[in-house]
Structure formats: structure tokens, C-alpha cells
Image: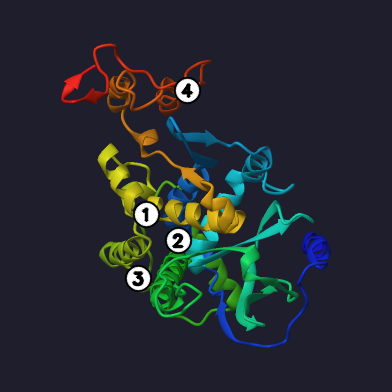
Amino acid sequence: MGLWNRIVQKMSKQTFKMVQERGNGFYAWNGRLYHSDVVRACIRPKTKAIGKAVAKHIRTTRTQEGERVEVNPDAYIRFLLEEPNPLMSGQMLQEKVANQLALNHNAFILIVRDEFEKPVELYPIPCSSVEAFYKENELFLRFVFLNGRESTFPYSDIIHLRDDFNEDDIFGESPMEALSQLMECVSIMDQGFVKAIKNSGVIRWLLRFTNAMRPDDVRKNVQEFADTYLSVESETFGAAGVDSKADVQRIEPKDYVPNAAQTDRIIKRIYDFFNTNEKIVSSLYTEDEWIAYYENAIEPMITQMSAVYSSRLFTRRERAFGNKIVFEGSNLTFASMRTKLELVQYVDRGIMTPNEVRAVLNMAPVDGGDRLLRRKDTGFMEGGEEE
């Protein structure tokens, strides 16, 4: 935890100290949800898509000619979004936060500021529990880390993302109650499959000797029977004959193995909980299926990230001057080549720039490609007539 020591030392000059009051709290579920291959497969497409969303600093100002839009006007904000801390890139930070949000419906990012109150670093906060309390009319969060240590930070220095925001005033609802029984069923199914596989190699034949025999003679006769009739290399494999000294009895294993219908129903319920389906998980989706998944599962989180990042990284005065953070995620990345080529018609109508279309086609930008173009036979309408 040397990293957290460095962060706490860097920020201890401001308002941070350990507080013992206890108040409203959220506790991460220790059900090892991420250890399930089904759950990990459910959240991986969403996590990867959110990681690919490009964070940009947008500044919109009003001039006499109209609105002026600047992209990444301040270098320190651009570097903060691209390289939030020395250990990870912006994409890695977004993926880690997306995982925590999917598993706990709460995700936290610590903002480290310099002596001028400018944000300089961002760190995701993995914790086992967090408690919220007020002190002198200011909201604080007290985190208990995975190693048992704890730290307290003001809520104004935390980027807090949440899902299923319902009863609690601060935290999102934990998925524990909704998923605990389903995950128990998945665990029982997995155990059933494992036991069935292990028991597939148990003794399936019982030789019952009618005469009393020494243990060594019993083992010798059993071995001769196995070598003669059960070995694939024997000439009589599959056919057996015994004399009156022994009776041969076949034993069928009766281990419980979950049937396919039960397994599919349980897995489908887990898919539904994470707002996904088998085609998304297996990357067998069509263009329309991905767009529907993107709009329902990914776009809401990207919208939330844009709003929360903006409110935490900029003051009210800075936001009043048109500063905001925007996460751009394009669902056209997964479109068919035919749909991508049809975007060309938007270039000469001033809807998209050439570089935006090239980005969809996974091509590098070109010089001068960020200007909006318009065909000469089109223009702005004034007084009902075209210019």
C-alpha cells in the first residue's frame, strides 16, 4: 500500500484525517463474483467498450460570430485524461472502474490536486467498504481497503459512479441480494459437473467370487479380468466370459448432472441481470443487435461519466465558461462495412469531418481533415431562398 501512503501524504496538508464517526455505509460483496466465468463473460463486452471511449475536454464559448468549440484546450486536462496516474492509462482506468461498477454498482476515483487546487492525478479506489458521514456540513467518505487499512477523503475529491440508484441517498444498490441465489445455483451446477467428470472413471464392474479367496488372489483375478476384457489393447475388448467362481455385475454411476435446460435458464437470468445476451457475450451479434446493446448498457454509463467528471474536475465558475468532459464512444465502430461507407455522404453535407469518418474506418487522420465541408450547391437558407 505504498501508493496509498504517497497519496495520503500528498493530500494530508489539506483536510484529510482519520475520523471515527460511523454513518451511512456501503459494503462490497465478498461473494467472489468476479471469479465466476459467467459473470466475467457478461461484463467483459461492456468493460472493453467503456475503455475505448475517448475522454475529451470541450470548451464552448460564445463570440460575435457564434459559438466557438475548442477540443482539449488545456494541456494539463488532456494529460490527466490520457495518463491519469503513473500506473495506468486512461483506457485502463476506465476499464477498472467499469468492472467495479458492474460488480458492486459503485465505483470510486480519487482526485489528487496540487497546491493550486488543480487536478493532477486520478486513482481508482478498490475497497472492501466505504462509509459516508458529514462533518461541519461537508460530506466525507471513509474507505476500508482490502488490507484492512483505511483513509478518509472529502466527497468533493471523489468521482463516484453508481448504478441501480434507488433507496440510498449516496450509494447505488448492491447486487448481492439479487445475485446471491443465482450464483449459488451456478456453484451447485459447477460442482455437479466436476463430480460427474471425476466419477466417470470409477469402478463400473463388480466381480463377486463365490469361493473364499485370499486378498492377493482377489486382486490378481480382478487385474486379469481388467487386462483381458477392459483394456483396449486386448483381443477380447468388449466381450467377457467368466466361470462359476465369479459373478460379474455392472454398476451404473448415479451422480446428479444438471441438464442443459436448467443450466440455460439460470445462465439466461444472469445475462438478463447484466443486460446482455449470449450473442453479445460470444461476439456473434449483428450490427443492429450491438447498437441496441450499446444504447441500453454502455451509453448510459458514458453519459454518467461525462457529467460526474465535469462536476468534479471543474469548478462551477469553470463550467459556467463552457468547460466540460465528454466521453466519446461510437457504436459505429461495430457497424458493417456497408454502413461505414455510407457515412461518406455525411462529409459533403457538413455533418461529419473527413477525419471522423476515417476514425470509424480505423484509418489515421490526415492534415486538414478536421474541417467541416459543404457542397457548393448547398448553403444556409435566408428568407426562404438558398444561397
N-term mark: 3 or 2: 2
N-term mark: 4 or 3: 3
Say what amino acid the circle numbered 2 marks: Val
**Residue 173 in view, yes or no:** yes
N-term mark: 4 or 1: 1
Say what amino acid the circle numbered 1 marks: Ala
Q: Which residue is mark 3?
A: 252
In the visual, does 4 lie left or right of 193?
right
Q: Decide: few, some or many residues near mark 3? Use Cα within 10 Å; few <14, some 14-19, many ≥20.
A: few
Q: Quadrant of the N terminus?
A: bottom right
Say what amino acid the circle numbered 3 marks: Glu
Residue at 67% in and 74% down: 143
N-term mark: 1 or 2: 2
What element does badge 3 sit on? Answer: loop
Q: Are marks 3 and 1 in contact (CB under 8 Å)?
A: no
Residue lying at the far left of the rendered structure: 384
Q: Which residue is mark 4?
A: 370
What element does badge 4 sit on? Answer: loop
Residue at 36% in and 73% down: 256
User: From the viewer's perspective, is residue 131 above or below residue 203?
Assistant: below
In terms of image quadrants, where is residue 43?
A: bottom left
Alpha carbons under labels 3 and 2: distance apart:
35 Å
**Which of label 3 and label 1 is nearer to you?**
1
Q: Quadrant of the C terminus?
A: top left
Q: How is the image coloured?
A: rainbow
What element does badge 2 sit on? Answer: helix
Q: Position of residue 151 (x, y in %)?
A: 73, 73
Q: Position of residue 7 (x, y in %)?
A: 78, 61
